[in-house]
Amino acid sequence: MGTSLKPENTGLPAPRLPDPDHADCRGVASVLSRVGDKWSVFVIMMLSDGPKRFNELKRMINGISQRMLTLTLRGLERDGLVTRTIFPTIPPRVDYELTDLGRGLQQPVKALGEWAIDHLMQIEAARTKFDQRNDS
């Protein structure tokens, strides 16, 4: 008898079996909902060149409210993408900075942004065509 082509005999990793609970998809969706929301991308890109204070970020991100910036920073901190450092000064100084995990997200976010810019006209045309078909 010859050697079988089972994964343990080939040195190749065993193929992943389908996940009936779709846990991977749910995990990916959870992460994408954080990094794909309206303001998180702005915050991540604004922090790409180093730590910033809250009001500095607020001035840099046109249109974001104080409450929304607070919620966005808390969500990014909760997900381990941003750190919040409080300095014991008077008045207290608080800096926000990307973690290693957050810095690792910069390139994929930038690539997705470039893809969106490159394909924006096609997407808008498809939306218009869809809306015309479905609004009649």
Image (tube, rainbow, N blue to C red):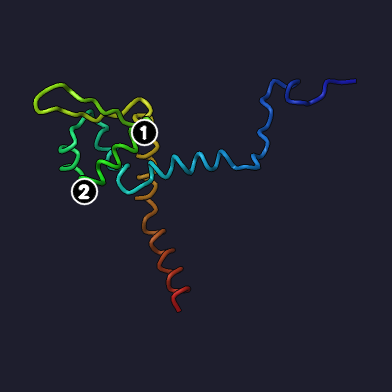
Q: Kindly identify which numbered label has been placed on residue 65.
A: 2
SS of the residue at dot 2?
loop
Callout 1, which amino acid? Arg
First of labels 2, 1 by sequence position: 2
At x 43%, y 70%, the residue is 131
Residue neighbourhood size for the residue with mark 1, other residues' Cα within 10 Å, grouped as few (<14), some (14–19), many (≥20): few
Q: Determine which residue is flagged by label 1.
A: 78
Please give left or right for residue 108 compared with residue 18 in the image: left
Residue neighbourhood size for the residue with mark 2, other residues' Cα within 10 Å, grouped as few (<14), some (14–19), many (≥20): few
Image position, residue 132 (x, y; %): 43, 73
Q: Compared with residue 33, is residue 133 higher up or lower down, i.e. above or below?
A: below
In-front residue for pair 58/126:
58
Image position, residue 1 (x, y; %): 90, 20
At x 49%, y 40%, the residue is 28
In-front residue for pair 60/11:
60
Please give left or right for residue 36 compared with residue 66 in the image: right
SS of the residue at dot 1?
helix
How many circles with numbers are drawn on the protein? 2
Residue most extreme to the left: 90
CA gap, disc 2 and disc 1: 20 Å
Q: Quadrant of the C terminus?
A: bottom left
